[in-house]
Amino acid sequence: MDGPFIDEFPTRRTDTIRGQAPEGGQSGYCRQFGIGKIDKQDLLNYGASIPGTAIGGDLFDPDCLPEEAFDCITLTQVSYPSMISSAPFTRYSGRRLQAALRS
């Protein structure tokens, strides 16, 4: 059910996929929708030991992402099973991701 929405959303937002753009888990969306607009693309994963990962960490960790370092962050189908329904997690991770974006 979420597949069509996940594929449709970046299609409508290709103008925002640009610059320094980490992507969660894999680089498919940045490669597909940021053609010619991505300056640097890193993989973001929960564990730094996952092959290809440039940024590894937990979004609960305030030092996971540097502030004002990215032009966009692409996270699709990212879940923390025990926390996904937690309102504090959702608010905190949203603020953390927003702080990592350049103004």
Image (cartoon, grey):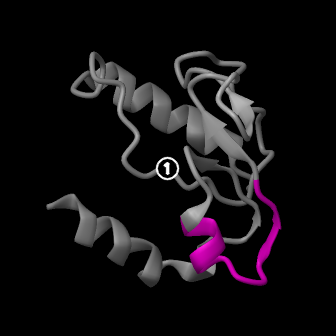
Q: Quadrant of the C terminus?
A: bottom right
Task: Please tell me in which quadrant of the rendered image residue 85 appears.
Answer: top left
Which residue is pictured at 27% across the width and 25% down the height?
87
Is residue 6 toward the left or the right of residue 49 in the image?
A: left
Which residue is pictured at 47% across the width and 38% down the height?
94
Which residue is pictured at 52% across the width and 35% down the height?
95
Q: Which residue is mark 1?
A: 75
Label 1 element class? loop
Residue 84 at x, y = what percent? 28, 28
The answer to whether residue 47 is magenta is: no
Which residue is pictured at 48% across the width and 31% down the height?
93
Q: Is residue 33 above or below residue 19?
A: below
Q: Is residue 31 above or below residue 58?
A: below
Amino acid under label 1?
A: Leu
Query: Which one is in front, 35 or 96?
Result: 35
Q: Quadrant of the N terminus?
A: bottom left
Give the residues in magenta. 29-41
Q: Is residue 52 above or below residue 33?
A: above
Task: Please tell me in which quadrant of the rendered image residue 24 appears.
Answer: top right
Query: Which one is in front, 38 or 103?
Result: 38
Residue 52 at x, y = what percent? 73, 41
The answer to whether residue 35 is magenta is: yes
